[in-house]
C-alpha cells in the first residue's frame, strides 16, 4: 500500500522559492533552495528560516497534567516555576532508552510540547497509553504551522515583520522561554547553535509570514543546512545519535535527567540508576578530521579502550573540515582512528559542541 506523502502549509511557497524537495520521514520537505552552503552561512552570519511545521505541537491539559509529565519525562517540569518557560527532555522507555527528545513549555492553559515528526505515531501512542486513568487531555495542534528564524540577526529581522506592539515582549524573551500572542506562540529556542525564534502560528497565515521574512532579508533554508548547523552545534538527531536502545547517559544527555527529588519515579529511572551504579560504559564525543576525507554515520571508531561508532558525520562549512558525533568507550582519550573505506584515519576527540555562536569552540 502506498502511503501518501504529507505536506506542510508552506509546500507551495517552497516551490515558489525554487526549493529542491525531498521525502523526509514521509513529508515533502525542502533540502535546499539552490545552495546548502550559502544557507548554512546565512544562519551563522546573518539570519535564515526553516519550515518545521512537520513537527508535532501538542497541548496538554487536565488536573493531572503536571504529575503525569513528571512521571513521563526524565527531566522535571516542576522546574518550570511560571508560565512561558521551556524545558528540554528525553521521554524514556522502562529500559532507559530514548523514545524521543522534546521541548515542553508551561503555559497559562497547561503545557505545550513539541515532538519530532518521524516519531509522531509512536510518541502519541505511548503518551496515550501512559495517560490512561489520569485526568490528562492531549490535543494535537495540526492547525498550526511552525517557522524557525535563526542566526545572529534573526530576532532583529523578525521584529521588522512582527506586529510592533509585540516587540518589547519578544525582545524580553530569555533563551528557553516563550510568549503567546493570541493564537501565535513565539519561543526563543532553536536547533542551530545560534540565537533565534521558533514561531507557531495558524497554518493559513504561514505563507504570508514566510514571504514577509524573506522580504526582510531572512534566507529560506532547507533540511541540508539544518543538519550541518545542528551537527556543528553538537545537537543530537533522533534515530541517529540516540534511539530506544540508547540511554540519555550514553547520548550526552545526562544533563537533562533530573535525579532530584529522589521520590519522583519517572519512567526509566530504575534502569538509569542501575546503569549509573554499574558505571556508564560508553560516552558521546566529537571527532575532528583535519586531513582529507569525510566522516559519515556508521563508521567504526578504533580507540585504545575498544571500538565505537560514528552516529552523525558531515563536512563542516564553518570549520572547513570533517566532523562527527560518536559513541565511544567511556575511557577514550583525546585521539582515535576511524575506518574510512578500509583505511584507518587519525581523528581528534573533542568535547561537544564544535561551534557556538558562529565560532569554533574546541582548542
Image (spheres, rainbow, N blue to C red):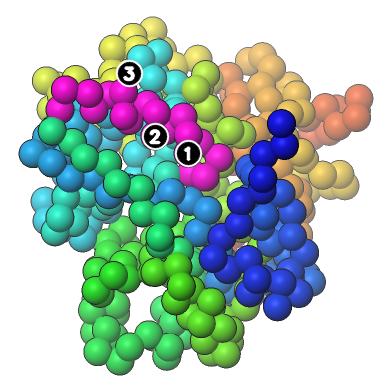
Q: Give the range drawn in magenta.
A: 116-134
Q: Mark 2 points at which residue?
A: 124
Apparent side of residue 256 relative to residue 342 in the rendered image (left or right): left
- The residue that appears at 76% across and 74% down in the rendered structure is 18
Residue 312 screen position, x and y as percent: 66, 39
Please tell me whether mark 2 sits on a helix, a strand or a loop: helix
Q: Which mark is residue 86?
A: none
Residue 103 screen position, x and y as percent: 35, 47
Label 3 Cα crowd, 10 Å radius (few <14 / some 14-19 / many 20+): many
- The residue that appears at 61% across and 51% down in the rendered structure is 6
Apparent side of residue 23 relative to residue 192 in the rendered image (left or right): right
Query: Along the polypeptide, which appears first: circle 3 or circle 1?
Result: 1
Front position in the image: 148 or 138: 138
Give the Cα distance between marks 3 and 1.
20 Å
Does residue 193 sit above or below 101 in this rendering?
below
Query: Along the polypeptide, which appears first: circle 2 or circle 3?
Result: 2
Q: Tell us which disc is closer to us: 2 or 3.
A: 2
Amino acid at each position: 500500500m502506498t502511503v501518501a506523502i504529507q505536506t506542510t502549509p508552506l509546500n507551495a511557497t517552497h516551490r515558489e522559492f525554487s526549493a529542491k524537495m525531498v521525502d523526509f520521514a514521509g513529508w515533502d520537505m525542502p533540502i535546499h533552495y539552490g545552495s546548502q552552503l550559502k544557507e548554512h552561512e546565512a544562519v551563522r552570519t546573518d539570519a535564515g528560516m526553516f519550515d518545521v511545521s512537520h513537527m508535532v505541537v501538542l497541548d496538554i491539559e487536565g488536573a493531572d497534567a503536571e504529575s503525569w509529565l513528571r512521571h513521563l519525562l526524565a527531566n522535571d517540569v516542576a522546574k518550570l516555576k511560571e508560565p512561558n518557560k521551556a524545558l528540554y527532555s528525553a521521554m524514556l522507555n522502562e529500559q532507559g532508552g530514548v523514545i524521543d527528545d522534546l521541548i515542553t513549555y508551561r503555559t497559562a492553559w497547561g503545557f505545550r510540547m513539541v515532538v519530532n515528526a518521524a516519531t509522531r505515531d509512536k510518541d502519541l501512542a505511548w503518551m496515550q497509553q501512559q495517560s490512561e486513568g489520569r485526568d490528562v487531555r492531549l490535543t494535537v495542534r495540526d492547525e498550526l504551522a511552525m517557522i524557525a528564524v535563526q542566526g545572529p540577526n534573526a530576532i532583529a529581522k523578525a521584529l521588522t515583520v512582527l506586529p510592533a506592539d509585540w516587540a518589547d515582549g519578544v525582545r524580553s524573551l530569555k533563551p528557553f522561554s516563550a510568549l503567546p500572542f493570541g493564537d501565535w506562540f513565539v519561543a526563543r529556542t532553536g536547533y542551530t547553535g545560534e540565537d533565534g525564534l521558533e514561531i507557531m502560528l495558524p497554518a493559513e497565515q504561514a505563507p504570508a509570514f514566510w514571504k514577509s521574512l524573506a522580504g526582510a532579508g531572512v534566507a529560506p533554508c532547507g533540511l541540508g543546512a539544518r543538519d550541518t548547523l545542528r551537527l556543528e552545534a553538537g545537537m543530537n538527531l533522533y534515530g541517529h545519535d540516540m534511539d530506544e536502545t540508547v540511554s540519555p547517559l550514553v547520548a550526552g544527555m545526562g544533563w537533562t535527567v533530573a535525579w532530584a527529588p529522589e521520590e519522583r519515579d519517572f519512567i526509566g529511572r530504575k534502569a538509569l540508576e542501575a546503569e549509573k551504579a554499574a558505571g556508564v560504559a560508553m560516552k558521546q564525543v566529537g571527532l575532528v578530521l583535519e586531513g582529507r576525507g569525510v566522516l559519515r554515520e556508521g563508521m567504526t571508531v578504533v580507540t585504545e579502550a575498544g571500538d565505537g561508532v560514528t552516529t552523525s558525520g558531515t563536512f563542516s562549512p564553518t570549520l572547513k573540515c570533517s566532523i562527527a558525533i560518536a559513541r565511544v568507550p567511556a575511557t577514550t582519550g583525546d585521539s582515535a582512528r576511524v575506518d574510512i573505506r578500509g583505511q584507518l584515519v587519525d581523528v581528534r576527540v573533542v568535547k561537544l559542541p564544535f561551534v557556538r555562536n558562529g565560532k569554533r569552540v574546541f582548542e
